[in-house]
Image (cartoon, rainbow, N blue to C red):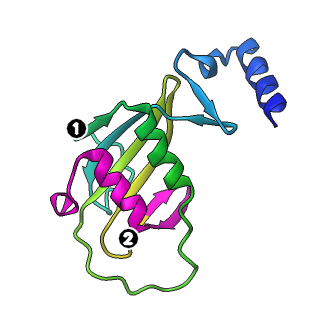
Amino acid sequence: MTKTLFAALVIAALLGGGDLLAPGAVISGGVLAPTRLQVWLTGPVLGLTPPSYPPIAVVTNAHQVRSLYDAMRTLKPWPKGVYVCPAMSNRAARLDFSSASGVIATALFSPSGCSSVTFDGKWLRLTPSFEALFYHIMGLDQADFF
């Protein structure tokens, strides 16, 4: 796997995709790892629409960013079915994870209703540990978010 990834990066660089090897790009476990997180407050209706206003937070501590990104990638999807969720607060956050090469992933953090993270085309079940990590990294109390 590592040799294949390295070969693919070398070929990409030779074919003009050298931005994959930009300074600051980090590869962790075969995946381009983010080093920066930008967060915008939004609502579930707007969702992943790119905002036209500045982010409420920018996290540049690469360890914290990777911790949240890795935790998000381990969240399990909600089982298929019909759900009757508690009332929603209409508060959500758009998360843009990026590296020196640009945005790697965008997610929607929705802690009310059927608490979830929408990421990589999947509706993922929010866990208390992920939620606590998010609030810790953001320097927020959960009550501050609502």
Q: Secondary structure at mark 2?
A: loop
Q: Nearest the camera: 19 or 64?
A: 64
Which residue corresponds to the image point at 83% horizontal and 31% vertical from the top-left?
Answer: 4
- Compared across the picture, whether 85 is left or right of 104 comes to left
Residue 41 picture location, percent across and down: 25, 50
Residue 53, numbered label = 1
Residue 34, compared with residue 124, is above or below; it is above
**Could you tell me which quadrant the N terminus lies in?**
top right
Task: Measure the alpha-carbon separation of dots 2 and 1.
Answer: 25 Å
- Compared across the picture, whether 117 is left or right of 30 comes to left
Amino acid residing under circle 1: Tyr
Q: Secondary structure at mark 1?
A: loop
Residue 24, numbered label = none
Q: Which residues are magenta?
A: 117-146
Q: Quadrant of residue 32?
A: top right
Kindly identify which residue carries mark 2: 115
